[in-house]
Image (spheres, rainbow, N blue to C red):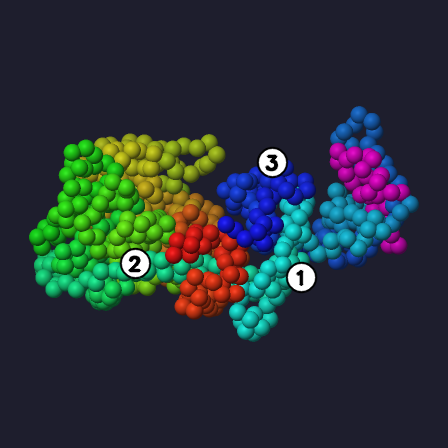
Amino acid sequence: MRPTLLDPLFVPVTSFSGVGPKIAALIARAIGRESADDTRAVDLVLLPPTRLIDRRNQPGIAYASEHAIVTLKLFVDRHQPAPRGKRNVPYRVFAHDDTGDIALTFFHARQNWLEHALPVGEMVLVSGKVDWFNGKASMVHPDRMAREKDAESFPFVEPVYPLTAGLSPKHLLRAVEGALASLPDLPEWQDAAFIGKNGFADFGGAVRALHTPRDEHDMDANAPAHRRLAYDELLAGQLSLALVRQRVRKLQGQPVNGDGTIRESILSALPFELTASQRVSISDILSDMQSPDRMLRLLQGDVGSGKTVVALLAMAACAEVGGQSVLMAPTEILAQQHYATIEPLARKAGLEVELLTGKIKGKQRKEVLERMENGQARLIVGTHALFQESVAYDNLLLAVVDEQHRFGVHQRLRLTAKGTAPHMLVMTATPIPRTLVLSAFGDMDVSKLSEKPAGRLPIKTVTIDGDRIQDVVARLREAVSSGRKAYWICPLVEDSEVSDLMSAEQRHGSLAREFGDLVGVVHGRMNSDEKDRAMADFKSGRTRLLVATTVIEVGVDVPDASIMVIEHAERFGLAQLHQLRGRVGRGSEASSCILLYKSPLSETARSRLTIMRESEDGFRIAEEDLKLRGEGELLGTRQSGVPGFQLVDLEAHRDLLEIARNDARYILETDADLSSKRGHALRLLLYIWRRDEAIRLLRAG
């Protein structure tokens, strides 16, 4: 149960004056909540303004610059309503100050409202942009107006919040003010010495300062109020990750001390030598698994760096002591590919590998489940099907989760809930900058595969204007006729009236006129049988040119494909371009990647394409992507398991992330169930940042 002290922060936004269901839905959309029902006062309290309107410039009418925001103190002379029945003629209010005259112009205005707001014969304050025409000043629809007697409440400095179509700044501002008015007094959850050293206000003071900036310095990510709240957000994240880790580690792992015989058989069957970083990673993994504490390790490896082999050797170590391992992939295509890589190597070492996906049904499924339950199956590769209720294991020692960001913390906990306590190895081909590893995977040790396997050649990357597409088609015709294979990536599945992007269906049609039956197509709207058929045709060489959407981004492995064309490359993120490029250059042949773009390019798009031309280093590309796009969407979507922060800017707050991680560890070492005075205050912090899951873990012990 959430403490009653926090009730004012969790009232729905509809409880504020002027916010009905329609406005609440718009506010939810503007601030990125899923629905109006889920949008609470706390979301407005923690909503930082995006910019500032400064109305302090009061030059007088004659000295007002055109289009600059000014505030004028005026004497109202007369009103000139629009003639009756002529709605398109504006309503004008004429006024003056010591320096000159001005006309305030309003369209579709209500006369009685204007007569009350701007009474003839009184002094008023108005703010907006002045237009000059033939030496005469006018202001169309002033942003702000107040009578002189109400001047104290006039907003000379005004914060601006993110908006969406249909939501007026006034409605959102009124809701934010309502939320701030109900802010409760809360106990301090931060360490007193840390607060003092950084000169931070308490939570309430920092929130109020966030919403009342006086100048551009107050809007900076490193302004004290912003930094204080960013640290709160980071600590809530690190603390909840640490609680997950504490929970996962509570169940003792089973030490794995194999004799190395199966591993030796696999190594001798490999057609290549392991790289130095593969050897180091395997050594780290084996050393973790020899301990009674459960392993929780992240294996980061760029596309083609050989993560699957590292995972197979870890699984082999478990088989040596009679244990089982599973490898879980996010899609059936990826699960089948892991199976295709692992099965022949395991078979040579005398190991049986099973494949379990949603597609395997009936008698075949029953037999697989029996072999898993009686321990006959030592290695099992599959999808989410591996953790359904009906699935039981004989002695599960290791779970390998591929592309972790597609699963998240909850699936890791579901694994544990199976009653087993396997060691966990999480793999990702999305190179993640260190700062993001800490913020999203702060609960894991990290191994990194930095080289590509021996024999892999660099991929030549070029950028070509989309107007020269026929040159690219001619080059492909030569390549295909000499027996090479190519991918052609499009951003959309089918034609859309609102977009000028080329769809996969349309491009497949145009290329089929050139290449006939040698062109295949694969995209997300096809069912899995159709996708499998298209991939099988491409692998076997029945088709030599595969038109695809980003469905092939992760894990598709056709070693003899050596050309990658990405259409509208300017519409893709850097990490995604890098993933797609990694589908070629997997064999011994020299490979190339052609980035087709549409002019003119934005500054960000130009930077992306330049980095792609210059570098194949996934970690450098990920760091650059973080700078260009921000952490919230680095891995493709906000839902991908990486936090989209509200107040944290990882570039500006990098130093705070390390401190938060260390603080979270210290807190749980000294107060594991958060029962001290500070611990109870930290529980409030977790609720405020909506980390209820972590508190449920505390209760579950």
| Left or right, 577 with reference to 167 | left
Image point (51%, 54%), residue name: 687
| Left or right, 545 with reference to 102 | left
Residue 606 visible within the image: no
Label 2 sits on a secondary structure element that is loop
The residue singled out by tag 3 in the image is 22
| Res 58 quadrant in image | bottom right
| 499 drawn magenta | no
Number of the label disc, if any, that sits on residue 297 = none
Tag 1: residue type?
Asp
Image point (36%, 56%), residue name: 612
Q: Position of residue 340 (x, y in %)?
A: 17, 46
CA distance for labels 1 and 2: 52 Å
Tag 3: residue type?
Lys
Residue closest to the eye, 684 or 137: 684
Mark 1 nearby-residue class (10 Å; few <14, some 14–19, many ≥20): some
Number of the label disc, if any, that sits on residue 215 = 1
Q: Position of residue 288 (x, y in %)?
A: 25, 65
Q: Earlier in the sequence, mark 1 or mark 3?
A: 3
How many badges with numbers are in the image? 3
Q: Earlier in the sequence, mark 3 or mark 2?
A: 3
Quarter occupied by the C terminus: bottom left
Label 1 sits on a secondary structure element that is loop
Question: Outermost residue toward the top?
Answer: 85
Residue closest to the eye, 460 or 276: 276
Mark 2 nearby-residue class (10 Å; few <14, some 14–19, many ≥20): some
Number of the label disc, if any, that sits on residue 251 = 2
Question: Outermost residue toward the right?
Answer: 121
Image point (85%, 51%), residue name: 149
Mark 3 nearby-residue class (10 Å; few <14, some 14–19, many ≥20): few
Magenta residues span 93-120
Tag 2: residue type?
Leu
